[in-house]
Amino acid sequence: MLPRWIGLFVIAIILFLLAGMGIVLRQRMRVDADMLRCQNHLREISIFAGRFSQENPAQPALTNEIPAGTIANRALPTEDRLSWFVTALPWLDQKRLPMADLASRVERSQPWNSKENTDVSRLKLPMLLCPGLPPMVAANQPAPTSYFGTAGLGIEAAKLTIRRVDLRLGNFGSWQPWQVPEGAGCFRYEMPTPFVVIADGLSQTIMIGEREPSPGPWLQGGPSTVRGYDIAPDAPPPVGTGGQFGGGHPAVANFAFADGHVAPISVHIDPQLLRLQLTIADGVVVRDE
C-alpha cells in the first residue's frame, strides 16, 4: 500500500493539471469571444456607414455609395475635418448612449478638435474599439478608434480622384463612364465612392480594416480614420502585431468587405492578394453605371 502522502501528491498534481487546462480553456474562450465581438462591430459599421447619405443624419436616405472619408468642409485641411464616422453615428447601437442625439451635438462646420466638439471627441464608443486590444487613452484626451476605412494602395491613396470622363462616340453622341485611378480603394477624403465603380465585386473588396498600432481619434478626418496600405519596401508587414492591420487577435486581423460581410485574414496572406482586395478596380478602369 502506497504511503498516504503519495496519494495526496498525485491528487494535487491532477488538480493542478485540471486548473491549468481550465485557465487555457477560459483564455481560448475569451479570445474567441473578442474575435466575434470585433467582427460584430465591423459588420454593423460597414452595413450602416457604407449605405446611408451623410447629407441629413436626421432623415437618412439609402444610397448606393460609400461616404466620403471626411465631412465636406473646403475651409479646413483634411486632418482638421470631421471623420466619416460622424455619418455612421445615428445607426450605431451603443445601448445606453443615444447616438442620434450624439450626432446632433457634433458641430459640423467646425474642426474636429475645436472647443465646440471637445466633449464629443472625448466620448469613448465601444463599437469603435476592438475588444481584443482596445486602445487606452486618458479621459481628457480624444477617444480613439480601432477601425479605419481603407483607401487603396499607398499612403496618399485617399487623395485619388474617381471622376466621370466624356467619351465622344462620333454621330452616336457621347458616353460618360467612370474613370478609376490605379490603386484606388473604397474610401477617398473628398467624395463618396459609388458602388458601381467597384468592378472587382463588393464581396471581394475590403472596405474597413482594424489596427493596433498608432490608433487615432474617431472624430478626426485624415489618416486617423482613412488609411492607404503602405507599399514602400521598408513598410511594416501587412497583418499582425506591429503590422499595418490587426494586432488585437492572435495571427489574424478582421476586415469588413464592401458587401457588408466580415472575415478574418491571416498573417500569412500573400501581400499581392491583399493588394488586390484593397483596390476597387485593379488598375485604370473605365466603367459605366
Image (cartoon, helix red, strand yellow):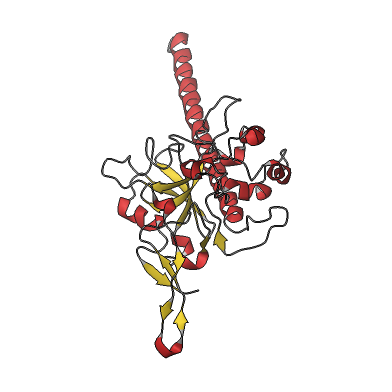
In the orientation shown, which residue stands out farthest toward the bottom?
171
* Residue 225 visible in this rendered orientation of the protein: no
Residue 230, compared with residue 175, is above or below; it is: above
Residue 31, percent from left and from top: 50, 36
- Apparent side of residue 154 relative to residue 44 in the rendered image (left or right): left
Count of picture labels? 0
Residue visible at 50% across and 31% down?
Answer: 27
Residue in front for this viewpoint, 262 or 76:
76
- What residue is rendered at 41% in x and 84% in y? 169
Residue 4: tell me if it is visible. Answer: yes
Q: Position of residue 212 (x, y in %)?
A: 45, 36
What quarter of the picture does the N terminus occupy?
top left
Q: Residue 276's x, y, as percent? A: 36, 58
Left or right of residue 143, residue 283 in this image: left
**Vertical order, 21 against 184 (above or below):** above
Asked whether 271 or 167 is in front, the reply is 167
* Left or right: where 136 falls relative to 184: right
Outermost residue toward the left in this view: 233
